[in-house]
Amino acid sequence: MKIRNRIAIQFTLIVATILIVFSGLVYTVSSDFREEEFYDRLKNKARTTCQFLVKVQEIDATLLKIIDSNTLTTLNDERIVVFNQHNEIIYTTADQPSINYDHNLLNKIRGLKELETYQGKDQVLGLLYEEGNEPLIVLAAAYDQFGHNKLLNLRNTLAWSLLIGMGMTILLSVYFAGNALKPIADINGQVTTITALNLKHRLQEANSPDEIGQLATNFNIVLEKLELAFDQQRSFVYHASHELRTPLAALKSEIQLAQHQLKDQPDIREVLFNLSTDIERLIGITNSLLFLARSFEDLGRLQMKPVRIDELVFLAREELYTTHPEYTIAIDYSNLPESENHTLIQGNEALLKRVFLNLFDNACKYSPDRSARVLITTDTAFCAISVSDTGIGIAPDDLPHIFEPFYRTPNASDYSGYGIGLSVCHRITEAHNGRIYVTSAPDEGSTFRLKLPHI
Ligand code: ADP
């Protein structure tokens, strides 16, 4: 999962938790407050009723009932029942006392002086009234319609606020996380373009001294060190192979001279012959190393210009025919290019020709009939050149390694070569933003496919 989405989810979860806890707290406090407030109102009501009954002589139960049912403060479904000390009803607002009670409840109220309870949805308050001649027990019950409506409204408001708050948090956190990580995404984009071939490339360093600016700076320092190490390695290979060439050439001519002078000593001649073969091989390897080091250098400062790839294919064939007249290379188009530009590539002619020379040479060298078939294909974005042969082929286990320097497959040991060509081809192709693929089966043949973006 992308860091941006992970941050957004984590942030949303945190905010959602805070909002839920906060909403729960607000709701619980409001609910408690409503309950207490309603008990207070019931208590006032019960006390007032008792005061009327006990202190105002002119009021009897009937009059009190009329007053009770007509005051503005009458509560929803309000019921009041007053008991004397023998638990006999001396006043009730309803004809039938609609509050459930028993002697236990009344005695409990006498003990506690005040009792708050629920009967169904109704709140019930029991009160011991001791201000008259005899202690009275009042039961007052009602349903807090208004309070419950307010609570319902609060609950809906909180739920909607929670949903809207979370929606906004998701959107804002995705936006801000994306914004915060954008410099990293930019760095990522730049890093992917850096390969061993363009180590000179540097990341854009932001002016801000934050962590991301620091990351770009440090990455550039690492690139600098890498470039230096690569340069040193390249120059070592170059100079070492260059220095080896002269003594090896001298050795070769001395051996040839000795062979000439010791013609009549067959034992020594054989030793000299073996020596000469080994020297040839050493010279070959040294030349390959030099070639590899030079090709790296060339790639570092590539001169690119528009190159017509099909012309280059024909040129490479002609050049190869001069050194290997026994080769046969058939060149064909799999489709006619729709536009002239479809075979035009921004590239380096000498290096691209080297790729074709190597692929054609390999195809013919590793085939018993010394022949290869080249197919040029174009589409709207790429120009592809495939080189097929019906030669010794490559085993599946060897396929991932053949572009590594000096790697040679076991079945190629009878053929000349040092395992350098394909690794150079690979590098040159990459330097041209192209790709090189191979499909092959042992004893059936191979197809190398080069895909280059055209102009
Ligand atoms: P080499 O000089 O040995 O041909 P390359 O780098 O050109 O060096 O090729 C590397 C190895 O890949 C070869 O040694 C050979 O084992 C294998 N290879 C390359 N091309 C072919 C081919 N057309 N058919 C079979 N094997 C091949």
Image (cartoon, rainbow, N blue to C red):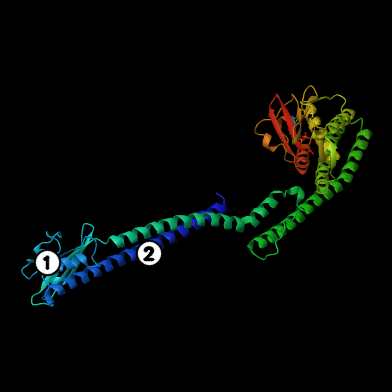
Q: Residues within 10 Å of mark 2 (few under 14, many from 20)?
A: some
Give the residue type that dot 2 points to. Val
Front-most of residues 282 and 295? 295
Type of the residue with mark 1: Thr
Badge 1 marks a residue whose secondary structure is helix
Find residue 41 and report its horizontal and vertical position in percent: 24, 69
Circle 2 SS class: helix
Q: Position of residue 150 (x, y in %)?
A: 34, 61
Q: Quadrant of ligand 1?
A: top right
Residue at x 15% of width, y 66% of height: 65
Task: Residue 26: give its label.
Answer: 2
The x and y percentages for residue 359 are 79, 32
Figure disc tally: 2
- In which quadrant of the rendered view does residue 399 lie? top right
Q: Judge whether residue 227 can be spotted in this image.
A: yes
Residue at 11%, 72% in the rendered image = 136
Which label number is shown at residue 62?
1
